[in-house]
Image (cartoon, helix red, strand yellow):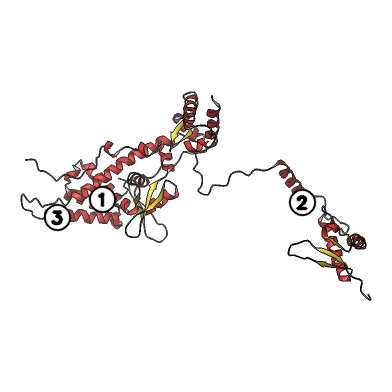
């Protein structure tokens, strides 16, 4: 007989796992089979005594399910001891309910054997990647364009520092003067123009920054006014009306 | 092999789970059910004996599976993982749910004679059973049923493949009153 495995999951008391028995009905069935007695005519006194001694032995006398079964067996035993009149048709066998449950459980055990065998046979046939997918399976592989990949690689390579290089001295990249000259030329031509006219469509970040600083500077000087007629709309640059006196 | 059979072969190879007839039909909407079934049969025949894998009808669909005789060798080489065995408690619970579905926890507890809450939760987590409806009565208890994964791990085509209760050696019957032989 295997001994119970006790493990303590936190402080919530012991969970009892039996290698051999999955519950009091299972243990009871085991005892009945061992004694080779007729399940429909249970020698209840004998079975009850065996059951009690086994749960004591296995330390199961703390487990409610087993204790409940022990109490039930003792009650049936007591009921059977009560005298009854011969030929009493009303008499109902106190074992009937237990026998019904045992038969039902026995049927389940037979199904368990069948299912276990089916699962074993199935387990010998491997599907592709039989490892069960995790419940939160990752999304399907992403589709990626070769050009996107090359562009990304270029960006990463550009970011990689040259190991031989400690510091690169760069000339001031912003060309505010150049941008100012360009804006002044536009102001001379037109009274009103847009942001696109200043930087063009393919402007780099440096061009944009230079133009922006130049515009702010010119606006501060009063050469032009900046306005945005609608939220997120294009910026409108207007030549300022000449003032009376600078 | 016909083009349709080849298409099914490709799809069944790519999928790592059984594909149902409806799923296979979506591959080629112009193919009728008759043509699909005929192609599946041709595909199954093509894989008959001559190959290490075979086309198996399982869980309401079809899947390519390795032949049984290679399981041990493949597993020893650690190329694939055999599923872990279910505990007796899990199998008991599954058996009750499979035959009594939709069934609530209380009934499972009663038949097993032990609290089955934790086992049921684990089976739900593993996707072998699921809540199918709520019962009448106090608290409208959750009622469970088996899923296609249940059929898959047992290698069954459908629930009708389970043994019928009458076929079991223990037929559940009302216990007859104890008759003393005269």
Do labels 1 and 3 touch, CB within 8 Å? no
Residue A110 coordinates in the image, percent (x, y): 30, 40
* In-image side of A236 versus B114 (left or right): right
Looking at the rendered image, the quarter that the N terminus of chain B falls into is top right
For the residue pair B28 and A115, the one nearer the viewer reads as B28
**Could you tell me if residue B72 is visible in this image?**
no
Number of the label disc, if any, that sits on residue A79: 3
Q: CA distance from mark 2 to mark 1?
A: 74 Å
Closer mark to the observer between disc 1 and disc 3 = 3
Number of the label disc, if any, that sits on residue A159: 2
Number of the label disc, if any, that sits on residue B33: none
Q: Chain of mark 1?
A: A
| Of the image marks 2 and 1, the number of the one nearer the N terminus | 1
Give the number of callouts: 3
Number of the label disc, if any, that sits on residue A54: 1
Residue A136's place in the image compared with A193, above or below, is: above
For the residue pair A74 and A230, the one nearer the viewer reads as A230
């Amino acid at each position: 007989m295997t001994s119970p495995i006790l493990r303590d999951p936190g402080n919530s008391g012991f969970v009892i796992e039996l290698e051999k028995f999955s519950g009091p009905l299972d243990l009871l069935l085991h005892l009945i089979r061992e004694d080779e007695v007729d399940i429909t005519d249970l020698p209840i006194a004998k079975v009850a005594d065996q059951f009690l001694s086994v749960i004591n032995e296995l330390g199961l006398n703390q487990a409610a399910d087993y204790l409940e079964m022990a109490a039930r067996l003792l009650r049936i035993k007591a009921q059977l001891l009560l005298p009854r009149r011969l030929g009493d048709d009303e008499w109902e066998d106190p074992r009937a309910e237990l026998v019904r449950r045992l038969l039902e459980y026995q049927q389940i055990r037979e199904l368990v054997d069948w299912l276990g065998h089916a699962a074993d046979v199935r387990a010998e046939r491997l599907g592709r990647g039989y490892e069960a997918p995790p419940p939160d399976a990752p999304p399907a592989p992403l589709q990626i364009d070769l050009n996107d990949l090359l562009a990304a690689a270029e960006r990463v390579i550009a970011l990689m520092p040259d190991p031989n290089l400690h510091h690169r001295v760069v000339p001031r990249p912003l060309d505010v003067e150049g941008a100012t000259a360009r804006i002044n030329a536009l102001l001379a031509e037109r009274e009103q123009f847009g942001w696109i006219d200043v930087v063009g469509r393919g402007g780099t970040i440096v061009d944009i920054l230079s133009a922006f600083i130049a515009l702010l500077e010119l606006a501060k000087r009063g050469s032009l006014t900046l306005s945005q007629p609608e939220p997120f709309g294009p910026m409108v640059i207007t030549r300022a009306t000449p003032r009376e006196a600078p | 092999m016909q083009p349709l059979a080849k298409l099914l072969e490709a799809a069944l190879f790519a999928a790592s789970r059984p594909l149902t007839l409806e799923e296979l039909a979506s591959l080629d909407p112009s193919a009728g059910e008759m043509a699909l079934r005929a192609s599946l049969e041709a595909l199954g025949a093509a894989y008959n004996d001559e190959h290490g894998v075979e086309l198996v009808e399982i869980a309401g669909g079809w899947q390519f599976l390795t032949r049984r005789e290679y399981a041990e060798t493949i597993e020893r080489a650690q190329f694939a993982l055999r599923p872990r065995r279910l505990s007796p408690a899990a199998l008991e619970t599954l058996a009750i749910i499979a035959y009594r579905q939709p069934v609530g926890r209380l009934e499972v507890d009663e038949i097993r004679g032990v609290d089955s809450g934790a086992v049921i939760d684990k089976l739900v987590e593993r996707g072998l059973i699921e809540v199918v409806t709520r019962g009448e009565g106090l608290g409208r208890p959750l009622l469970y049923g088996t899923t296609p994964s249940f059929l898959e791990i047992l290698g069954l085509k459908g629930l009708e493949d389970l043994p019928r209760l009458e076929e079991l050696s223990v037929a559940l019957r009302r216990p007859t009153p104890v008759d003393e032989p005269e």
